Amino acid sequence: MDGVVSRPDLWANFIWPAYGLTLVGLIGLLVWAFVSMRTAEKKAEESRRK
């Protein structure tokens, strides 16, 4: 197990892609929530006009 612990570059190679993927996923989720909220508001306004 020491071989793995003494190789920080190995950990970096594993962690950075996972971190980037998580960050992209979170941002995507926020954007999707915002867009769905906006579309719901527009639909509500249209139904009120009719």
Image (cartoon, rainbow, N blue to C red):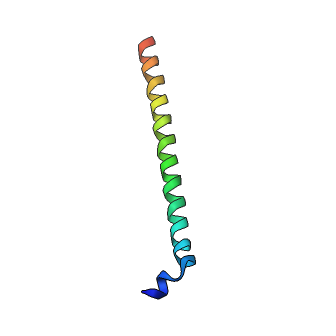
Q: Is 3 situated above or below 37?
A: below
Residue at the spot 48% in from the left edge and 57% down from the top edge: 22
Q: Give the image quarter of residue 9.
A: bottom right
Decide if residue 16 is on the left or right side of residue 36: right
Looking at the image, which is closer to me, 35 or 14? 14
Q: Would you say residue 25 is visible in this rendering?
A: yes
Total numbered circles: 0
Residue at the spot 51% in from the left edge and 72% down from the top edge: 14
Q: Would you say residue 50 is visible in this rendering?
A: no
Residue at the spot 42% in from the left edge and 86% down from the top edge: 1
Q: Is 37 situated above or below 24?
A: above
- Image location of residue 13, percent across then percent down: 56, 73
Looking at the image, which is closer to me, 50 or 2? 2
Quadrant in which the C terminus is drawn: top left
- Image location of residue 33, percent across then percent down: 45, 38
Q: Residue furthest top?
A: 49
- Image location of residue 12, percent across then percent down: 55, 72
Looking at the image, which is closer to me, 2 or 34? 2
Q: Is 31 situated above or below 21?
A: above
Residue at the spot 49% in from the left edge and 35% down from the top edge: 34
- Image location of residue 25, percent across then percent down: 49, 52
